[in-house]
């Protein structure tokens, strides 16, 4: 599921944001990644010493204000990779630095992974309060959207779709089960050269 910020959100992190909600289990937190905010920093400049990122011109994405030094990667795979969490369909998330290096060393032009720095997270009551204030729309997550070639235009596209569809998230918060699944995924350091 994507949370799409409504017009009235003026928080500098979440204004015009599209947040991909992550599957959760037994966690006191609700977690997501802002998917439509590429930074001005290329992966090659972010990790200049890492062979996996040399000459990479794709931008790093701002995933949210929590743990901005912890990278995560969203990618497609026809098989279930070890050290990754399935988001939906053939779209996966990993925090594993070895898998991140491998993904970028073997990346094909048609399916470049997206690297995110940080994440968004809420206590359930905090998100419920934002929902009651009418801050978010809910839109079904689709793989092609997260890998959009025009991430800056994604908010407008999904916002307009939500308005036309009359989406209301007030009774549809995501399942709160991230911790159990993330425990299987090693959360590690930045790849070499990123510190």
Image (cartoon, helix red, strand yellow):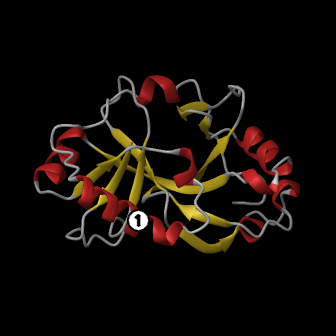
Q: Is residue 192 left or right of residue 185?
A: right
Residue positioned 85% across, 50% down in the render: 105
Q: Could you say which quadrant of the image residue 114 lies in?
A: bottom right
Q: Which quadrant of the rendered structure holds the C terminus?
A: bottom right
Q: Is residue 42 left or right of residue 127?
A: right
Q: Nearer the viewer, residue 76 or 50?
A: 76
Q: Residues within 10 Å of mark 1 (few under 14, many from 20)?
A: few
Mark 1 = which residue? 157
Residue positioned 38% across, 69% down in the render: 156
Decide: is 64 above or below 153. Answer: above
View extreme (front): residue: 164
The answer to whether any part of residue 69 appears in the image is no
Residue positioned 32% across, 69% down in the render: 15
Q: Is residue 165 left or right of residue 97?
A: left
Residue positioned 25% across, 53% down in the render: 165
SS state under label 1: helix
Image mark count: 1
| Percent position of residue 9, x then y | 24, 68
View extreme (right): residue: 51
Q: Is residue 153 left or right of residue 2?
A: right
The answer to whether any part of residue 189 appears in the image is yes
View extreme (left): residue: 132
| Percent position of residue 76, x then y | 67, 41
Q: Which quadrant of the rendered structure holds the N terminus?
A: top left
| Percent position of residue 10, x then y | 25, 73
Q: Nearer the viewer, residue 75 or 157?
A: 157
């Amino acid at each position: 599921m994507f949370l799409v910020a409504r017009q009235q959100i003026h928080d500098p992190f979440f204004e015009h944001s599209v947040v991909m909600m992550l599957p959760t289990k037994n966690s006191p937190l609700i977690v997501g990644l802002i998917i439509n905010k590429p930074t001005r920093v290329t992966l090659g400049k972010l990790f200049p010493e890492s062979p996996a990122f040399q000459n990479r011109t794709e931008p790093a994405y701002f995933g949210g204000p929590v743990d901005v030094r912890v990278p995560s990667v969203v990618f497609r795979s026809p098989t279930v990779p070890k050290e990754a969490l399935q988001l939906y369909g053939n779209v996966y998330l990993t925090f594993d630095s070895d898998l991140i290096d491998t993904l970028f060393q073997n990346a094909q032009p048609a399916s470049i992974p997206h690297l995110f720095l940080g994440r968004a997270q809420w206590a359930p009551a905090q998100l419920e309060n934002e929902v009651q204030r009418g801050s978010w729309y809910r839109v079904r997550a689709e793989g092609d959207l997260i890998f959009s070639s025009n991430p800056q235009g994604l908010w407008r596209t999904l916002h307009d779709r939500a308005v036309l569809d009359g989406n209301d998230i007030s009774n549809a918060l995501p399942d709160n089960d991230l911790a159990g699944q993330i425990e299987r995924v090693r959360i590690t350091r930045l790849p070499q050269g990123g510190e």
